[in-house]
Image (cartoon, helix red, strand yellow):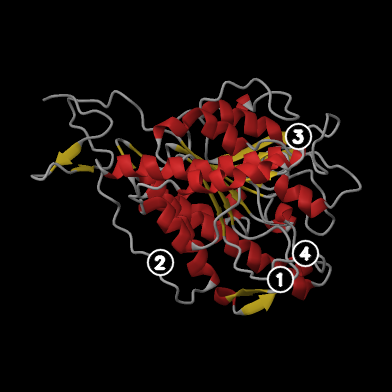
């Protein structure tokens, strides 16, 4: 029998090709190339209630903790990492820092180009290395259903091309669906028309504004490039069968679940290998309706009322709810076979928060859970204790290296967390 490669294709009578998922190989044949690695960073706002998240010192039974119990079905592929911390610039808004700097953690003693210690975030450094493999460079998803735009962009985005240059997240499942599965056949390049109209306007701008305008148009141009790559991709591959989202009302859980399903399909279909996913904005003044929990509360307000047991109980339910949503996503990846392993095995998926404690605004002892073994290169299924105040950037550096980035230092890192390697 001829050896089976990474993927096979079925070619129809009309010449169209359909990409098959990773195929099981017969006993006398082995796949020659491992599945491509996928990277996803999930963000949960304002930390977690600590005594429901972290086990007692020395205990490896993290799956028995109330907040982490939803992870039990994939517990052998999950690692709780303790002792991580990130930089905190005093005198600036702690919540803005928590989210906008979560994936960059730039050295605050360096030359900052922003009020916050932000830089090009981990997801884009990884996308720089792997985006040639997929039609879509990266996905930035955000389950923020609020319509009142009174809060800052720093609270609503964890993905940044660079200081003050946000990679705006998508919040509407219909828009995500369109990005993944809709192509455009047009002889007219919209971006070219806009650039042509803006040429004279640009002449009147100062250098800083010109730079900002160039950044904006580069972001738009990247979307155009993705559409072109999708046109080429779908000329050879059948589109995944997933129902197009409608504009009907959804519960909080349905909303997050649908966004996660779209991401899982994007990974399975190799439409992208890099994504960020905010389960909610870092802080929002308006109360959030948690339909499945049958209450409407301000998550931020709950974090500052933990001394009251009734309030704390509400907050624990919110924490448990978000971990449950994350666990469902992991289970989706685990259900997809790729050779002798699963899609989860060929992924690096992290759930974390930029605050260790939402009540006291600490940025040490961050709640970080990592899932997937990066094709067997990572140890999973237990607790990995780091020395106190180990830079979070050490974890990001390891993940970047596993994803193929030629980095020896990232932000304030002191070295990769090599103890996590199998």
Is 247 or 381 nearer to us in this picture?
247
* 10 Å crowding of disc 2: few (<14), some (14-19), many (20+): some
Label 3 or label 4, whichever lies nearer to me, is 3
Q: Gap in Å between the C-alphas at discs 4 and 2?
A: 33 Å
* 10 Å crowding of disc 3: few (<14), some (14-19), many (20+): many
Residue 54 in sight here: yes
Q: Are marks 1 and 4 in contact (CB under 8 Å)?
A: no
Residue corresponding to mark 2: 245
Label 2 or label 1, whichever lies nearer to me, is 2
The earlier-in-sequence mark between 2 and 1 is 2
Helix, strand or loop under label 2? loop
Which disc is residue 106 wearing? 3
Label 1 or label 4, whichever lies nearer to me, is 4
Which disc is residue 303 wearing? 4
Label 1 or label 3, whichever lies nearer to me, is 3
Q: Are marks 3 and 2 in contact (CB under 8 Å)?
A: no
Residue drawn where x is 47% and y is 59% of the image: 175
Left of 364 or right of it: where is 37? left
Q: Are marks 2 and 1 in contact (CB under 8 Å)?
A: no
Is 281 or 44 nearer to us in this picture?
281
Left of 62 or right of it: where is 379? left
Q: Gap in Å between the C-alphas at discs 2 and 1?
A: 34 Å
């Amino acid at each position: 029998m001829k050896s089976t490669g990474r993927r096979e294709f079925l070619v129809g009578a009309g010449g169209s090709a359909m990409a098959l998922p990773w195929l099981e190989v017969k006993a006398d044949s082995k796949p020659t190339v491992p599945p491509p690695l996928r990277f996803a960073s999930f963000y949960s706002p304002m930390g977690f209630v600590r005594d429901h998240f972290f086990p007692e010192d020395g205990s490896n039974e993290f799956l028995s903790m109330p907040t982490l119990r939803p992870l039990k079905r994939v517990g052998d592929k999950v690692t709780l990492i303790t002792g991580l911390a990130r930089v905190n610039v005093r005198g600036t808004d702690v919540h803005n820092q928590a989210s906008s700097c979560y994936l960059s953690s730039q050295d605050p003693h360096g030359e900052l180009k922003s009020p916050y210690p932000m830089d090009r975030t981990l997801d884009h450094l990884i996308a720089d290395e792997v985006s040639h493999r997929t039609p879509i460079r990266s996905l930035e998803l955000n389950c923020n259903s609020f319509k009142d735009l009174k809060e800052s962009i720093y609270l609503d985005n964890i993905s940044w091309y660079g200081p003050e240059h946000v990679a705006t997240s998508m919040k509407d499942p219909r828009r995500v669906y369109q990005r993944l599965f809709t192509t455009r056949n047009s002889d007219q390049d919209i971006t070219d028309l806009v650039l042509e109209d803006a040429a004279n306007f640009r002449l009147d701008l100062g250098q800083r504004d010109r730079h900002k305008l160039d950044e904006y148009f580069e972001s738009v141009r990247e979307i155009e490039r993705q559409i072109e790559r999708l046109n080429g991709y779908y000329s050879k591959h059948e589109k995944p069968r997933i129902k197009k989202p409608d504009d009907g009302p959804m519960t909080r859980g349905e909303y997050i679940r649908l966004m996660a399903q779209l991401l899982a399909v994007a990974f399975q279909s190799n439409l992208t290998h890099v994504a960020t996913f905010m389960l909610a904005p870092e802080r929002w003044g308006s109360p959030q309706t948690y339909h499945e929990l049958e209450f409407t509360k301000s998550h931020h307000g709950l974090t500052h009322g933990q001394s009251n047991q009734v309030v704390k109980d509400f907050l624990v339910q919110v924490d448990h709810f978000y971990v449950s949503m994350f666990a469902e996503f992991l289970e989706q990846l685990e259900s997809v076979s790729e050779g002798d392993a699963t899609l989860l095995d060929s992924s690096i998926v992290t759930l974390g928060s930029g605050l260790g404690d939402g009540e006291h605004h600490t940025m040490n002892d961050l709640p970080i859970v990592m899932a997937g073994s990066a094709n067997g290169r990572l140890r999973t299924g237990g607790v990995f204790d780091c020395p106190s105040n180990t830079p979070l950037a050490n974890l990001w550096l390891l993940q970047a290296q596993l994803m193929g980035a030629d980095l020896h230092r990232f932000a304030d890192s002191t070295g990769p967390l090599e103890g996590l390697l199998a």
